[in-house]
Image (cartoon, helix red, strand yellow):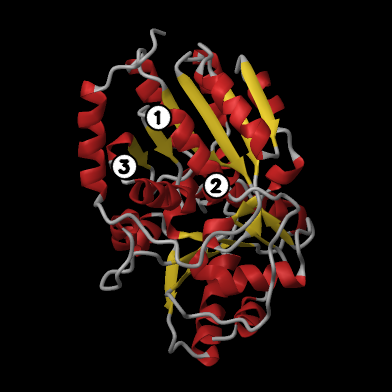
Amino acid sequence: MRVEDFIEILGADFYTGVPDSQLKPLCNYLMHTYGIDPKHHVIAANEGNCTALAAGYHLATGKVPVVYMQNSGEGNVINPVASLLNDKVYAIPVIFVIGWRGEPGIHDEPQHIYQGEVTVRLLEDMNIEAFVIGRDTTENELAAVMTRFHESLAAGKSVAFVVRKGALSYDGKVKYENEHLMLREEIIQRIVRAAGEDPIISTTGKASRELFEIREVNGQSHKYDFLTVGSMGHSSSIALGIALHKPDTRVWCIDGDGAVLMHMGAMAVLGANAPKNLIHVVINNGAHETVGGMPTVAEGIDIAAIAKACGYPHAVSVDNFHDLDKELEAARNREALSLIEVKCSIGARDDLGRPTTTALENKRNFMEYLKIFESKRNF
């Protein structure tokens, strides 16, 4: 189905969400049509954020908003759906558009398998009526469903469209780019070199895929790395948990701007605990690149200043390899929590692969390595 027809049938004029590769036609259409426009389209930090934003839109206008997201974001919306939108509370209607990763019977990455199994069930548990859109869904079918959904929306209930892979199409082209020059893969290569045999926790998406391939090219073991293939926004908290309980082990966290924004409160907890053995590197390309390249708000904020305000003793921002290498070396030799924001270009190799080890193998090898690892420095 053409996304233009989908949009027309929904009949909404305000969209907010978190980008998803399954919904790339919708995301690209919104960016091509509206860009980032507070009247019509806002990309939120996380799915709960956009659900509350949508509620504010309804309160201000009386109209029904659309919230789009990957199904992995359902967990983030459970609280606002149950305690804000629900018809037993404020009865605020929202149309959810959800990309169905990990659909049963369709091959996908391990982090999507269970989420895919419970996607529709979670919606049912939240009393949200759902309709699944596939490649064969016609405009007439969708229009009939939307007519039925209008009754639920008028009663203050939310509804959802669960979108299968390839169900939506869009012929328009949108190019996402910025003015930064450093490639993320080269940045990670330098982090790996600076870290040596220290453990690394890497964030969701292409960063972890690139870290895995760098180890392959270097002929190195993957035991040094914990690849956070799911749970976007939580890699720094995982790193904090390790650093607090392995105080003699220097721990590195490779993070992304979209992940940092998704659960920014983690930085406050990091700063409050200030483990002297943790180095937090935030690679900021101002984009949700792994799911298509749509922008985040990180291009316009000062992540280093936020870190300092949260209690990080040291936080800097760099935009070239000379300064990056210097700051990585300084952080490695510093006995204090450190943050390095790295301004990065958008883009990755077309032939970038995926980890060939399973998530369980990654966990077991990493845990075994932590048991025997001894830091070369005394913290």
Q: Residue at x 47, y 21 (%)?
A: 278
**Three-letter amino acid code at the position of disc 1:** Gly
Amino acid type for the residue under numbered disc 2 = Glu
Q: Residue at x 48, y 65 (%)?
A: 98
In the image, residue 299 sits, relative to residue 289, either above or below, namely above
Residue closest to the eye, 262 or 286: 286
Which mark sits nearer the N-terminus, 3 or 2?
2
Residue placed most toward the observer, 48 or 367: 367
Q: What residue appears at the point 71 percent right and 67 percent down from the top-left corner?
A: 31
**CA distance separating discs 1 and 2:** 16 Å
**For this view, does 23 lie left or right of residue 114?**
right
Q: Quadrant of the C terminus?
A: top left
Mark 1, other Cα within 10 Å: few <14 / some 14–19 / many ≥20: few
Q: Tag 3's secondary structure? A: loop
Q: Is residue 101 left or right of residue 350?
A: left
Q: Is residue 187 left or right of residue 174?
A: left
Q: Which residue is mark 3?
A: 220
Q: Which mark is residue 186?
A: 2
- Judge by depth and name the residue closer to the eye, 337 or 13: 337
Instruction: Determine if residue 266 is in view.
Output: no
Mark 1 sits on what residue? 196
In primary-sequence order, the first of circles 1 and 2 is: 2
Where residue 361 sits: x, y (%)? 21, 45
Q: Is residue 29 in sight in this rendering?
A: yes
- Disc with the residue nearer the chain's start (1 vs 3): 1
